[in-house]
Image (cartoon, rainbow, N blue to C red):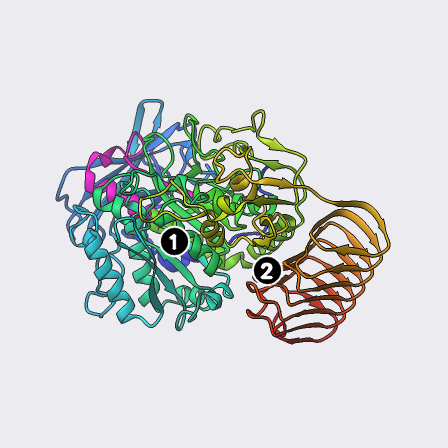
Amino acid sequence: MRDRRTTAILSVLLAASLAAITGPTPAYAAAAEPNQVDGLTVTQGDGYATLAWTPVDGATDYQIERTPVAADNSATGPAVITGVWRPNRQINNSSPTFADAGFNPGTRFQWRVRARFGTDAQPYSAPVAGTTSAPWGDPNVPGENLRTQWETTLAAQYTSDVDEYAYTKAIDDLSDRVRVTEIGKTALGRPINMFVIGYPTPPATPEAVAATSPLMVNCNVHGNEPGDREGCLIMARKLAFSNDARTIDLLSHTTVLIVPTINGDGRAANTRGNSTGQDLNRDYSLIRQPETFALVQMLRDYRPIAGYDGHEFGNSSAGDLPMLPPRHQNVAQSIFDESQHMIEGHMYTEGAKDGWWPCPYGCNGGGNVGLSEETILRNTLGLKNVVNSLLELRSSGGTTRPDEGNTANNRRRKTYSAVWTFNQFLDYHRANLKEITTARADAITFQVSNTGRIVFRGSRPIPAHPAPHPGEAPPPLDAPRDGQVLDNVPCAYKLTEEQYNGERTDGPAGQRTTVAQRLAAHGHKVVKVADGYLVPLAQPERGLIPLLLDGQGVEKLVDGERVYPTVTGKHNGQLVVSGVTCLRDATVTGPVRVRAGGTLIATGSSITGPVDASGAAGVFLTDTAVEGPVRIAQTSGPVVVVDAKVTGPVEVSGNRGDAPLVAANTVTGPLQCSGNTQAPVNIGLSNSVEGPKSDQCASL
């Protein structure tokens, strides 16, 4: 489906990061020769220069020439064709632009552009010369003067792990805005660090960070794809020390989370996988490896609402910056739509302004890319209700960037194109925070309702963007195959003691985790029942749970028993819950009483009468209307009350399990919470309460 959002996007980055047009200013008279390009301007950006010109009628493409020059504009080296502009590069062909990159920032060049009709080259434009922007940061100011190993070697070397740790520590030491925290260790024991950046200081705890609607950039999962990582390290320095209005505004309204290197072992060895050979981007749901386990725990605790995941790819004929949203069909529609809008509504538009070439992953020749594996981070994030995109830096120059057979130039283009993308991501989050949080809220309330089919493997289609479109082909469709759809959805899965706590054989020896530990890392709620463990689907990550626990799943973690509803349709009179009772699309006329040790899971139902649970094993009340008071007290396991409509008071007190989830409810009466071992949370989805909210629920 095409972009559903129509909100106009204004680029803060363009005004903040681009310098004035470089001189000399060209004359805007008619071209001196037939088909000669005129109106050429060159605007300096952060590691790139945006060329813009007046199009020539009938031109099939344009060649961009760059020549190193001295201060007097005399050539100091040979002229080279650095780029080729093609019509499928941008969505607005009437104003062609090209982001020339690959040069060493701070050097001076002259640029010319010429049109071509097929292979027939036309006359060059008048030249425009200018000095490119030096790397951000005053060399004489502590903090600003920090440089990565990649920068100091002029892209001859990537930053080593030792230099990364020294660089991140120095930023942490010198900037009050930054806290570097270790979220875990690699299989070989390398720290996995994360920048937590806010203004004037970052919030002190993960829960406090989560309250700021943070965004996250994961920079290096494949060890042999380091371009995004270098860009992240550069961006972190500017966020830590810049005092420009844009940076202060951004950090005053959210918290930026940057994970430079989740796969430090693979980066040190320059291998795609980690030290065990595991492709970590095929493990974010199963979390068999310590690296992915650490990142998923971070997602649970810090709750970013938007994310970007950095990679590189090998198609040298496609766009500069292929992108792709979470496509798994279990991802809520609102998350898919908002992610697509971020790509097509913002990145395509801003790319056309600045000269970069974002496109859908698979944009040239399609290919078996961008499919629906829930193990891939963009899909895992989508299933966790995070608006996000994959980013693929084109790993080599190719026909549209012919100068980038030069290794250093190619590395610089990759890194600064990542800097551009991640900065645009920050701007999108800042300008669209309301829309992102609304999409997330809609996704969570949809997921907890446990409605609709479960798809074990299958992607949402992405039609080609209307011409002129950035690319030649949309990504291929991975439609569900036979046996990959479950229409009769259970209300929960039950695991045996062995399945839940038993020793696993997957993962590195000495670092293996149980199913119990992995579900806890994901943040999934589990009820201890008499003969095992119950994992209800009426919770925020409902779309992910069956992919892990159902025997029909493609990558199943364990083959759990499906537990189906026990009460549907009409039920007259009192309903007493002593074991496990699952209500779905039920109408109960009478009180509901949950006895000690009982478990109630109610979704999409209505109850006329009070709901009283005392000493229960677990209570899940979602997408359900209750006419009467609700009291949940002394529960030993999880309490989940989300998107319920209660006519009467609600009491949540003395519960001994994890923090009760009380979110997005409408309560006609008071909401009172006290004595819970952990204070209830709403994960950013406020409750509408007509009466007073008191004690532990006062802020919900």
**Residue 311, picture quadrant:** top left
Q: Please state which of residues 72 and 654 is positioned toward the viewer in this rendering.
A: 654
**Image position, residue 525 (x, y; %):** 56, 54
Nearer to us in this view, 530 or 150: 530
Residue 232 vs residue 662: left or right?
left
Label 1 sits on what residue type?
Ala
In the image, residue 581 above or below residue 549: below
Placement of the N terminus among the 4 image quadrants? top right
- 539 in magenta: no
433 to the left or right of 563:
left
Work out which quarter of the rendered image holds the C terminus and state it: bottom right
Position in image of residue 633 (x %, y %):
67, 68
Residue range (magenta): 390-417
Number of numbered discs on residues = 2
* Any part of residue 347 in sight: no
Please, is residue 477 above or below residue 392 in the view?
Answer: above
Residue 408: x, y in percent?
20, 42
First reached walking from the N terminus: tag 2 or tag 1: 1
- Tag 2: amino acid: Gly
Secondary element under disc 2, as helix, strand or loop, is: loop
- Residue where numbered disc 1 is placed: 294
- The answer to whether residue 575 is left or right of residue 338 is right
From the top left corner, tell me how far across and down residue 136 is, in percent: 27, 60
Per the image, the residue denoted by label 2 is 637
- The answer for how far apart the CA atoms under marks 2 and 1 are is 25 Å
- In the picture as drawn, the residue positioned furthest to the left comes out as 76
* Mark 1 surroundings within 10 Å by alpha-carbon count, few (fewer than 14), some (14 through 19), many (20 or more): many
Residue depicted at 32% across the width and 62% down the height: 238
Q: Quick one: which residue is furthest to the front in this view?
A: 531
Mark 2 Cα-neighbour bin, 10 Å: few <14, some 14–19, many ≥20: many
- Residue 547 in view of the camera: yes
